[in-house]
Amino acid sequence: MIPLSGETRQFHSNSARAAWLRPNGRGNDCPITGLNHLRSVHHNRTIDITIEGDPNGLWDAGRLGQALSNLMANAIQYGDASKPVTALIAGHDPAFVEVSVHNSGSTIPPDVQKTIFKSWTRGQVDGPGRNPHLGLGLYISRLIAEAHGGTIAVASTEVAGTTFTFRLPRA
């Protein structure tokens, strides 16, 4: 049992451990190592990951990897295929790490942004390469961020594109 955000959340006994958002040769403790699978499946897409500052924290690496994978998969599916999908892992704040996933392309309307993290909420499924899905990925990502005492947000405009950001306390 690990106290997070004023509540007690139950994790598997070995799930809360140091996780690195930088590949470091320590097995599955790096949540971004799972992104290699996305790169191999979507070999025709450019996926860029930038790490700034200290990316270390005490998180459930498997769940954090799941949240990051959900965000990256959505960016690949809904983003403009001719433009890169980018992830920025910013560890400049001594108390938090921010992970942002960005894509260009169709924006998310403001009314949809208000409900996008609820269960069974789906984005646009019309268009080439867009497959219907259950609408659980962003909901699960929100639950993972909150279970770690963090937050998740979306910003989407025609000019800037779409960016999902989750902010996690380091411990």
Image: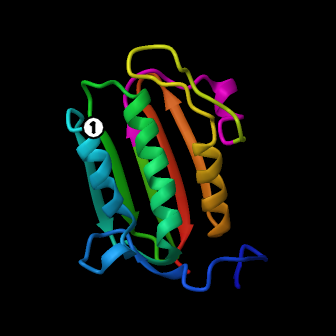
Residue stretch in magenta: 102-117
Position of 34 relative to 136 (above/below):
below
Q: Nearer the viewer, residue 31 or 51?
A: 31
Identify the residue shown where x is 38% and y is 22%: 129
**Front-lying residue, 140 or 20:** 140
In the displayed structure, does residue 38 sit left or right of residue 95?
left
| SS class, disc 1 | loop
Q: Among all residues in the image, which is located at the extreme right?
A: 7
| Main secondary-structure element of the magenta-colored stretch | loop
Query: Based on the displayed image, in which of its 4 quarters is residue 44 positioned?
Result: top left
- Amino acid residing under circle 1: His
User: Image quarter for residue 86?
Assistant: top left
Specify the quadrant that holds the N terminus: bottom right
Query: 96 left or right of 19?
Result: right
Total labels drawn:
1
Residue 5 position in % (x across, y down):
72, 73
Q: Quadrant of the C terminus?
A: bottom right
Which residue does the image show at 41% across and 36% down from the upper left?
Answer: 75
Q: Position of residue 12 (x, y in %)?
A: 62, 79
Question: Where is residue 111 shown, x and y percent of the image?
Answer: 69, 25
Quadrant position of residue 120? top right
Q: Which residue is mark 1?
A: 42
> Is 134 left or right of 20, judged from the image as shown?
right
Crowding near pointer 1: few (<14 within 10 Å), some, many (20+)?
some
Colouring chosen for the image of the structure: rainbow
The answer to whether residue 30 is above or below residue 81 is below
Q: Is residue 106 magenta?
A: yes
